[in-house]
Image (tube, rainbow, N blue to C red):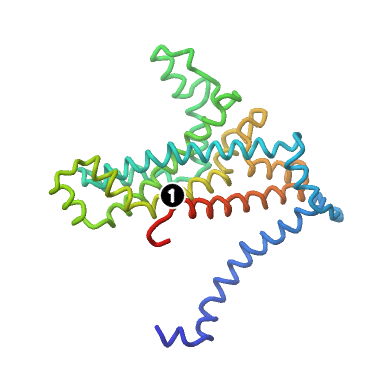
Amino acid sequence: MDKIRSNKLALFLFLFPAALLFTGIIILPIIMSAIYSFQDWDGMTQAKFIGIGNYKELFTSESAGYLRTVGNAFLLAVLSVFIQLPISLGLALRIARGIKGEKFFMTVFFVPVLLSTVVIGQLWLKIYNPNYGILNIALKNLGLESWCHTWLGEQKTALLSVFVPQLWQYVGYHMLLMYAGIKNISPDVIEAAKIDGASDWQISTRIIIPLLKPVLKICVIFAVTGSLKAFDMIYVLTKGGPDHASEVPSTLMVSKIFLENRYGLGSAIAVTIIFLCFFFAVLIKKCIRTEED
């Protein structure tokens, strides 16, 4: 291994394919988007350089609706951190105790992660259907007809209705990460706490969760950045409607580029999404300090 590391030609040959692929798929599109974001371009005619005009329109024009979409994305991020992650943590703590059928439950909760988001979106479209959807039928059978809604067709319920399938799909993903982190904790530490008379609650809150902080930090970063760049589930369920109630930056970007042919403005939205994801990833990493940091 040391011999390979000392051979710069070998290192170059090993790293070049991956570096070339990374540059072509990630770096170059980001650079091109940054360039287009300073232009007024419809994708066909000659592009016109307009400086920060697209960014100015995003943050000052109400017709662009960008700030509203960022607010929706932030709301999804807050819900993910304070609802989805605690559920994942609770499930991971419970399953990691060695309950009967541990592997079965791990598989069941992780199955939604393996399914296509489009398939899950179509499933929840049927669940939310106001006429034959199982949700409204269940509410009617329970005598709660006043609670029935056109869940994806009303402004007050659309965004939260979109969040529920996302929670259902990815709660198993975060649970698996936390479960692996819990299993990586030395059993001797937990056994010593039990000998000292610690309850399960005390073991979870004072031993496991503090030792799980590096994994929790990663989960928070994934939850926040995933909400900021959310697209597929929202597009399948509502396409950002009704009346932009569930619009997020990614759906607005697609609308501007492919429906209005405003490639410059759409590229500006893409750049802001990238910036927000990097900014909050760094911020979360700074706020949640671990021993490794």
Number of residues whose C-alpha sits closer than 10 Å to that of mark 1, classed few (under 14), some (14–19) or many (20 or more) = many
Label count reads: 1
Give the image quarter of residue 244.
top right
Left or right relative to 154: residue 191: left
Look at the image and tell me in which quarter the N terminus lies: bottom left
In the image, 167 versus 123, the foreground residue is 167
User: What residue did someone put label 1 on?
Assistant: 219
* Residue at 50%, 38% in the rendered image: 78
Q: Is 173 located above or below residue 235 in the figure?
A: below
Rendered view: 189 above or below 23: above
Left or right: residue 239 versus residue 11 is right
Quadrant occupied by the C terminus: bottom left
**Residue at horizontal 66 percent and vertical 49 percent from the top:** 272
Q: Is residue 282 above or below residue 138?
A: below
| Front-lying residue, 246 or 221 | 221
Coordinates of residue 129 in the picture (x, y in percent): 52, 25
Q: Residue at x 46, y 83 (%)?
A: 5
Q: Percent position (x, y) of residue 219? A: 43, 49
Q: Is label 1 in a helix, a strand or a loop?
A: helix
Q: Position of residue 275 (x, y in %)?
A: 63, 53
Above or below, comparing residue 208 to residue 72 in the picture: below
Residue 233 point in image, percent of width and height: 54, 40
Q: Which of 206 and 218 lies nearest the eye of the viewer?
A: 206
Q: Amino acid at mark 1?
A: Cys
